[in-house]
Image (spheres, rainbow, N blue to C red):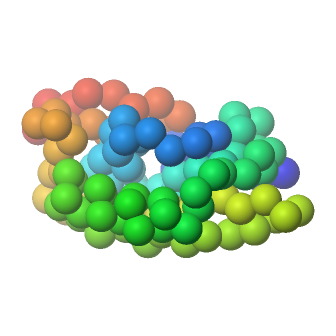
Amino acid sequence: MFKKENQNTEYKQSWRDEFLKPVCAFANTQGGTLYIGINDIGQVVGVENAHKLLTDIPNKITDMLRIVAIVNLKREKNKEYIVIKIKAYEAPVSFKGKYYIRSGSTDRKSVV
């Protein structure tokens, strides 16, 4: 079991493109890690199409946010999950023309 969600950690059971928003918020704050295939209480539930996501996610991050994240595949108890590590960026990063920051375990719209 993983630690609870916090300023630098977020869990999602599956990938959706809207999760680029927390990636953006991490980049605009202190950096952070987004786990795909982990539920809200930190248990590995696994992710489908993990190998396809290993290509899709980095491409979407670069194409939509213009940043680079480290995306890795991990395995626990025969279940695969994805770890996306985002560093803090000095220049503001936007998602769909809006800027987000991380406040506690939430993403907040920011004024740049």
Q: Residue at x 52, y 52 (%)?
A: 34
The quadrant of the rendering that contains the C terminus is top left
Q: For residue 40, what is the image quadrant?
A: top right
Question: In the rendered image of this protein, does residue 35 appear above or below residue 12?
Answer: below
Where is residue 30 drawn, in percent x and y? 39, 55
Where is residue 51 drawn, in percent x and y? 55, 68
Is 47 displayed left or right of 89 in the figure? Answer: right
Q: Residue at x 40, y 59 (%)?
A: 57
Is 29 displayed left or right of 74 in the figure? Answer: left
Q: For residue 78, what is the image quadrant?
A: bottom right
Residue 4 seen in this snapshot: no
Is 46 displayed left or right of 104 in the figure? Answer: right
Residue 110 seen in this snapshot: yes
Q: How many marks?
A: 0
Where is residue 9 drawn, in percent x and y? 57, 48
Q: Residue at x 52, y 57 (%)?
A: 33
Furthest residue in direction right, as rendered: 77
User: In terms of depth relative to the viewer, which is nearer, 17 or 105?
Assistant: 17
Q: Residue at x 47, y 30 (%)?
A: 106
